[in-house]
Image (cartoon, rainbow, N blue to C red):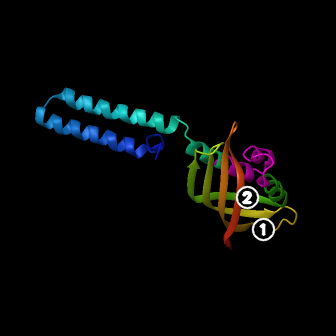
Amino acid sequence: MRNFLLENFWIWLVLAFFIAVIGFIVFTHKRDLRLLGGSVLGSVLVLALGAVLVWGVPTDRKLIVRSLDETIAAVKDDKINDVLVHVAQGSPVERIARAGMIAFRVEKASYSDLKITIDRMTAPPTAKLTFTAFAQVRGKLTGEGPFPTRIKFNVEMERSPSGWVISHCTFDPHGGLL
């Protein structure tokens, strides 16, 4: 709720619409084109301000989603070093990522149902993510596959000087192979 205006363009769109509607209503009663022009200009300025704030100001939630997206892209590109940039050093996730990327090649990957809970009271701030991932994997050693899978992830991230990194991860086959 803290960053509602920075993460939700709809509120800016609704506000701009109401400014335009109020301007039009006042114009119909007063017949002054300056009022109509002022309301249109006000609407455009509100939309511009909203666009700058929503797409230009990085929030923790946006940075977390960007880190998750970059991690998934690195996994699909089979670049272990790019994956490890998004993993806390020395964490169990680092060993899991290395072992998984040695054994499997992820050919396709996406996620849905992302839920993020940020705790700014911890030092460093942490976040808990839950989402369902859909992937097609192929065994690197055997070449078998691709196997479509659906996996439920619970991920913990922490803010580091380099950004949000994965510190803990559990996953549960959610329906297993598709």
Mark 1–mark 2 contact, CB under 8 Å?
yes
Give the magenta part as a residue range. Answer: 69-93
Residue farthest to the top, as pictured? 34
Residue 6 part of the magenta segment: no
Calculate the distance from the C-alpha at mark 1 to the C-alpha at mark 2: 10 Å
Q: Is residue 20 above or below residue 119?
A: above
What residue is at 26 percent from the left and 32 percent from the top? 39
Judging depth in this view, the residue of 5 and 175 nearest the camera is 5
As displayed, is residue 131 above or below residue 162? below
Q: Secondary structure at mark 1?
A: loop
**Residue occupying the point 17% across, 36% down:** 26
Query: x, y (%) of residue 152?
Result: 65, 65
Percent of width and height locating residue 167: 72, 50
Which numbered dot is residue 145? Answer: 1
Local secondary structure at mark 2: strand
Question: For the residue marked with disc 2, what is the amino acid?
Answer: Glu
- Residue at image position (80%, 57%) is 96
Q: Which residue is mark 2?
A: 107
Q: Foreground: 62 or 35?
A: 62
